[in-house]
Amino acid sequence: MAPMLRRRVARAFLGVGALAVLYGIAAEIGRGRLPDRVWLGTHYVENVQLLPPYRSLLEETAFLLESGILLNSIAVSAGRVLLGFVLGAAFGILFGLATGRATRAEYLADPWVTFFRFTPALALLPLFVLWFGYGEGSKVLLIAASVAVVTLLGAHQGVRSVPRVYLDAAAALGASPEFAFRKVALPAALPHIFASLRIGLGLGWVTIVVAELIDARMPSLGYLLTLAGAYPRVPTMVVGIATIGALVLAFDLLAMSMHARATRWMRRTAG
Amino acid sequence: MKKVPTQRLVLGSASLAAMVLAYTLLSNAGLFRPEVVPPTQEIAVAFTELVVGTRPPPAMEGDLHAGHHMHGSDHVGTLLQQGVTLQGSLAITAARVLFGLAAGVPLGILLGVFMGWSRRADDYLHPIYVLLRSVPPLALITYVMLWLGHGEAHRLIPVVYAVAATMVIPAYHGVRDVLGTYLVAARSLGARRWLLIRKVILPAAGPAMLAGLRYAVAIAWMTAVGAEMLMSENGMGNLIVGGGLWASRTQTKADPAVVIVGIVALAVAGWAMDAVARAATVRLTRWVR
């Protein structure tokens, strides 16, 4: 097992490293050859580095770190995503468990779940701004809304996909429906719920990029990207995109390890 | 057997009707300002105006100044002046979604099958895929615009990217999970590479890919509308935010009636496309049972 893992890690580094070297070469070749004047529909913008070399990326990162912009932006945006995620997930999982458990509740909720499932959450943004104001409320609630729909479906499907036999067996052993739900259905639904939580986290980050254009104030990653796009300053843009990507990756890994911990009792194949 | 669907239908439509009724009563009760919570009849008016594409002329000249003029009609008026209709916007967005699916699905499946098929390709490419996938598609939009100019490309590429990134996973796992007994059996029966891919791997990975497709449809709508809200002069995203590039302003003057009409239209369109995908799934995987 160990040599295989070592080979995989080596190849992973080789693959990513090759890409990084390729980028460096492309940036060197492109310097002076790529156009630095770009037509933006209404006007030209000058001095655009389409492929900023590593040196300017590092300088930009150093500047953004030293001035505190990057760390503050990360804190503010991640805080919004997390708050919205927790609110949305709590609501979604509770409702999903309810509709998964009681058929009547499912039928009552069905048209609404279908409706919100196919509504792109971003489309709700203008409405949320009107209802909850320009401040934190509309951003956090927008993320909560997009997370709630996904987790509701996940929890619902999780409860529904528990094999009938498990519940029958529990009942035959004398478990009350309450007990069977808590000790059998709920743990068996966990993989579905965790899968939907991971999707919800990703959606939260997609949402924040757009949501932070409302009442745009500086410490926020969405606005950092927009500002970089307005000038345009490509090194800032690339650092911003890479930061968001790294955060999404970190959150995803965190969710995966939590999933693995919570379902340790299940027999599963590696990976 | 017949009882369950009728109960579902009755309870479902009852809950729908109850909610609409409650909203109508609440919005007409005078508790909220109508420009924040528009009454149901105003939403209906906005809907017909956006579908017909013209506004009925005011009954009397003086009415305009007598406060009869609707508050939020600004938004609808601006849209109508630009010749924007609901069905037109929906068609434009649907075209972008379909393009994103048409280009992104084969791309994602190709990459997923390749990584699932070859251990070596998986070792090299999977880390790169995970890094790229982590970037939200809409974060790329301004960078793509710098490269490809202010055309259609920077609205389409995020959709293609989002769809492809979504489709990789089901294709990958679909192929990966087959590579067991089926493969050994087919190989021992003498199946060579192409036959193996066509007759064993693709059919076995099919259900997972089709399930992924339904998810990709939802993602494509979300990304297309988001891209239009940020950077487009047409489509549903533009209809909802009331024209112009949202990225270039910090305030919105959207009329909630139009937003609600837009959301309902998007939900119906998304549902219809999902129904097609679901029907395709049932047809194409009939042999599974």
Image: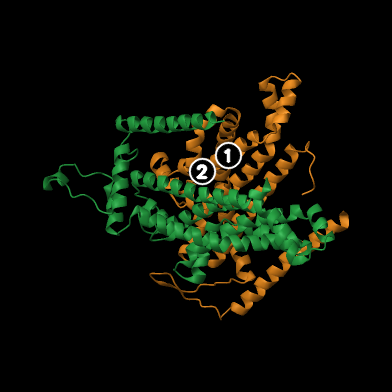
Q: In the visual, does B155 lie left or right of B32?
A: right
Q: In the visual, does B7 lie left or right of A163?
A: left
Determine which residue is flagged by label 2.
Answer: A117
Q: Secondary structure at mark 2?
A: helix
Q: Nearer the viewer, residue A47 or A245?
A: A245
Q: In the visual, does A239 lie left or right of A216?
A: right
Write down the chain letter for disc 1.
A
Identify the residue at horizontal 44%, vertical 43% (top origin). Answer: A135
Is residue A168 placed above or below A162 in the rendered structure? Answer: above
Mark 2 and mark 1 on one chain:
yes
Image mark for residue A192? none
Tell me where residue B246 appears, x and y as whole percent: 41, 56
Whether residues under marks 2 and 1 lie with C-beta atoms below 8 angstroms apart, the answer is yes
Tell me where residue A81 appears, x and y as whole percent: 56, 45
Identify the residue at horizontal 38%, vertical 56% (top origin). Answer: B89
Query: Which amino acid is tagged 1?
Result: Leu
Q: Which chain is green?
A: B
For residue B75, say whether it is visible.
Answer: no
For residue B74, say whether it is visible.
Answer: yes
Q: Nearer the viewer, residue A189 or A54?
A: A189
Mark before the other along the chain sequence, 2 or 1 = 2
Image quadrant of residue B79?
bottom left
How many numbered marks appear?
2
Tell me where residue B270 appears, x and y as whole percent: 48, 49
Task: Compute the Cα span from label 2 to label 1.
Answer: 9 Å
Is residue A52 placed above or below B31 in the rendered structure? Answer: below
The tint of chain A in the picture is orange
Q: Nearer the viewer, residue B149 or B259?
A: B259
Identify the residue at horizontal 33%, vertical 55% (top origin). Answer: B85
Query: Which amino acid is tagged 2?
Result: Arg
Within 10 Å of disc 1 (Cα), the crowding (few <14, some 14-19, many 20+) is many
Image mark for residue A153? 1
